[in-house]
């Protein structure tokens, strides 16, 4: 779902992409930690902005490009099927 960069729930992500003149992001979903389903503190939000993938975790960015290992670990821990999400996003 295309959203305004102002709707991204991380000021750090917003600032980075305002400098790069990216005005929109693709919101790819929210994901709850399997052992902390009821806690919003453990929720990840996934965005694609200017072709870069980034998680927002409590407002802190986790960039796939810069922290590939942590990004991949989070995909595994949270059970996120990234290829499926990206294909579904392209189809919509």
Image (tube, rainbow, N blue to C red):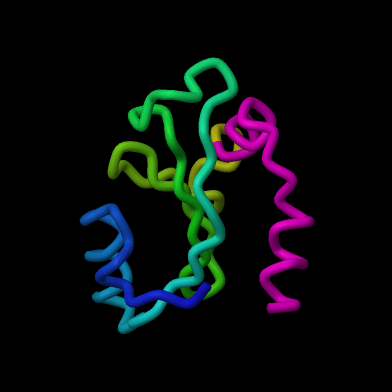
Bounds of the magenta segment: 71-92
Residue shown at the point (57%, 39%) measured from the top left: 71
Residue 88: in magenta span: yes
Q: Is residue 33 above or below residue 28?
A: above
The spot of residue 67 in percent (x, y) is 51, 41
The spot of residue 18 in percent (x, y) is 25, 75
44 left or right of 83?
left
The spot of residue 44 in percent (x, y) is 46, 40
Query: What residue occupies the far top of the structure in this picture?
Result: 35
Q: Which image quadrant: the C terminus?
A: bottom right
Viewer-nearest residue: 37 or 59: 37
Residue shown at the point (21%, 56%) measured from the top left: 11
Q: Is residue 20 above or below residue 70?
A: below
Query: What residue occupies the far front of the structure in this picture?
Result: 38
Residue 80: in magenta span: yes
Viewer-nearest residue: 59 or 88: 88
The number of numbered discs placed on residues in the rendered structure image is 0
Viewer-nearest residue: 30 or 16: 30
Q: How would you classify the magenta stretch by its main secondary structure? A: helix
Residue shown at the point (75%, 77%) measured from the top left: 91
């Amino acid at each position: 779902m295309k959203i305004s960069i102002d709707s991204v729930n991380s000021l750090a992500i917003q600032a980075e992409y305002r400098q790069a003149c990216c005005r929109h992001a693709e919101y790819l979903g929210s994901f709850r930690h399997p052992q902390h389903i009821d806690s919003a503190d453990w929720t990840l939000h996934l965005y694609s902005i200017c072709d870069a993938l980034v998680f927002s975790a409590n407002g802190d960015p986790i960039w796939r490009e810069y922290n590939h290992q942590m990004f991949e670990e989070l995909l595994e821990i949270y059970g996120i099927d990234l290829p499926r999400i990206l294909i579904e996003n392209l189809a919509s």
